[in-house]
Image (cartoon, grey):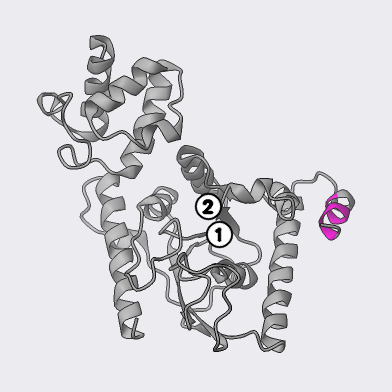
Amino acid sequence: MTTDNLELLQKVLAEEFDLNESDIVPEARLFEDLDLDSIDAVDLIVRLKELTGKKVPPEQFKSVRTVADIVAVIDSL
Amino acid sequence: MLIMPVCCWYWGNTADRPLKVRRLIGGATDVFRCLMKTLGVLDYRVERESHPDGTEPFLIVANHPSLIDVVFLLAEFPESQCVVKRALWTNPFTHMLFRYSGYISNDDPETLLTESVAAMKNGDSLILFPEGTRTRAGCDPEFKAGAAAIAVRAGRSVLPILILVTPTTLTKADHWYSVPEEKVFVDITVCEPLSVTDATGVPDERQAIRQFNKRLQQWYCERLEAKGC
């Protein structure tokens, strides 16, 4: 997991979904801990595409469960 | 397979061709359901608690007990847009229909949302099953938030359609070739619209979507329970 991508994700999640950055740790579960749902996941993909210029394939996002999982997906793009 | 290419060629690549294709599909599904009724394969009834006059676009949603649900919705609302399975774009029997209809594919959640909202803001009605798949037999419908998100973001009301199919047929658990012993009866109710602006005091769009989805799901559970499901 790269630090840059983790920090980028923390900033995006905090801004877009009104979360505390201190709660956005790698092991945080998106649904249970951060209260994100499927629409939030779509909006997150859109925001990441705007910032990185790269689109996360929807099928890659289906198995994402934690913050660390999303960072791993961004790292792989 | 024959009529569609001829019609598409005749109509030409014009802005209103998708609407004409959708009307053709609506006409064909209407003929199909009447034929099935005449042949005694099934019977159906459409009850109208509300009478949309076509001036206001709606997000037309329905529970999804059976594979034949969409036939009745397309016949009732022939000019509407519809969210359809991506697989139908590559099916040799249906690919021309969907290529020229302007229907929206469910392939990519991002484009599904943006295209649906855009179509509704443009004044089109849209048919969508909030469950995203057929209801599991014997269970309450489980609505994903996509329908609520489209309605809230487009600022359009939802026209809820209640569908009952007895005996159950063409569910996720049935094979398509399993014909029930008893004649199938499809009971369709076009209900009063539900407005997204009824959610007063909602702090932000995310909460509005979640609240409306919960309200929509609860509405369906109550209506289905009242019908004995």
Is the residue under label 1 in contact with that under label 2 (CB below 8 Å)?
yes
Q: Which residue is mark 1?
A: B125
Q: Is residue B16 left or right of residue A66?
A: right
Q: Residue B185 at x, y = what percent?
A: 54, 85
Residue B110 seen in render: yes
Q: Residue at x 38, y 66 (%)?
A: B136
Q: Which residues are magenta?
A: B3-8
Q: Secondary structure at mark 2?
A: helix
Q: Secondary structure at mark 1?
A: loop
Label 2 vs label 1: CA separation? Answer: 6 Å
Which secondary structure dominates the residues rendered in magenta?
helix
Q: Is residue A47 left or right of residue B95?
A: left
Q: Nearer the viewer, residue B36 or B203?
A: B36
Identity of the amino acid at label 1? Ser
Label ID, residue B120? 2
Q: Residue at x 44, y 34 (%)?
A: A58
Q: Quadrant of residue B142?
A: bottom left
For the C terminus of chain B, the image quarter is: bottom left
Above or below residue B141? Residue B109 is above
